[in-house]
Amino acid sequence: MSYIIGILSTIIVILVVYINVLKLQIRRISFQLEKRLREQTRQPVSLELIHSELNQLVVNMNKCLEAEEVFRLRGIREEKQFKELIANISHDLRTPLTAIKGYQQLLEQESLSEGQQRKLKIARKHTEELGQLIEHFFEYSYLINAEPDIHLEKINLTKLVTECLLAVVNTLEERQLSLSFNDSKQVFVTGDKEMVLRIVQNLIRNAMQHSDGQIEISIMADRDVTLSFRNPVRQSVSIDVTRIFDRFYTGDKSRSGSTGLGLSIVRHLAEQLGGSVQAGMSNEVLEIQVIFKKDE
């Protein structure tokens, strides 16, 4: 009897050791996967224990990881090709647009009837809109292809926004848009002046293009600085605020001459400066917020 008990005890000990070894190998597999995620390495998972089922599991895991890597590299390649396509399109469109503007200027020097002048004015308006769209394409292609060259400095955000608004006063009046801006307090941020300027200009253009009345601009300073643009919008039910910063998203089936790149550029620049963006909709009023680092 004692002999049988001894054999059973030995078997139990062996099984316990074997189970612990299996658990150790599983923990090592888990550690290797965590390391891949943490360090973004492409090292395949390895196994020290000779166990057919665990070996097959590791083989299948490595096949999945290899397939994922193929998809990742393909995505990077396609994204690069897409960026190059956007850059080429933006450059190619500039040449015929310049020619169109030239011929329109020549027509203005001709003796035209009132009806012809009206048609030429409409054509020039659409040409200007097309020019703005091409500039958006050009700006976007430049930003996503160029390495960021950021020069941080102290920026008077209140003054910069005021200057940008003064530059579009005539356009605001033409479109019968009212404006309110709480510029009583001077607020400073840390950032690249050119990049912050582009952010503000794109926010103003977006508000003017889609506002259905008043535009409210405010700057709130706490631990960070929040630049807020609020305006009522047409067809607000069609706007998905979770996608509003996605490239080419317009939320408007008619598009209204918009590429959907303006807010995408805003997000891109804000994130390069270490900030963030967010959007919300309440009672058909859209609010866009850009958070900057406060200058201490």
Image: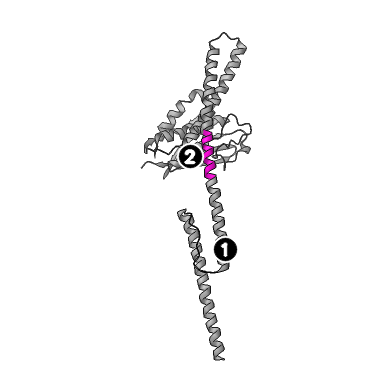
Of the residues shown, which amino acid type is indicated by label 1? Leu
Does the image show residue 171?
yes
Image position, residue 93 (x, y; %): 54, 27
The segment highlighted magenta reads: 75-86
Residue 79 falls inside the magenta stretch: yes
**Residue 258 placement, left or right of 196:** right
Is residue 103 shown above or below 14? Answer: above
Is residue 156 shown above or below 34? Answer: above
Residue pointed to by mark 2: 268
Q: Which one is in front in this view, the residue at disc 2 or the one at disc 1? A: 1
Residue pointed to by mark 1: 57
Question: Around disc 2, counting alpha carbons within 10 Å, would you say few (fewer than 14), some (14 to 19), or many (20 or more)?
Answer: many
Q: Quadrant of the C terminus?
A: top left
Mark 2 residue element? helix
Q: Residue at x 46, y 42 (%)?
A: 271
In the orientation shown, which residue stands out farthest toward the bottom? Answer: 1
Answer whether labels 2 and 1 touch (C-beta < 8 Å): no
Question: Around disc 1, counting alpha carbons within 10 Å, would you say few (fewer than 14), some (14 to 19), or many (20 or more)?
Answer: few
Mark drawn on residue 202:
none
Q: Quadrant of the N terminus?
A: bottom right
Mark 1 residue element? helix
Q: Residue at x 54, y 23 (%)?
A: 96
Principal secondary structure, stretch drawn in magenta: helix
Image position, residue 182 (x, y; %): 45, 34
Q: Residue at x 55, y 69 (%)?
A: 51
Work out whether residue 210 or residue 75 is closer to the camera in this orientation and state it: 75
Q: CA distance from mark 2 to mark 1?
A: 41 Å
Of the residues shown, which amino acid type is indicated by label 2? His
Q: Quadrant of residue 39?
A: bottom left
Q: Residue at x 49, y 65 (%)?
A: 28
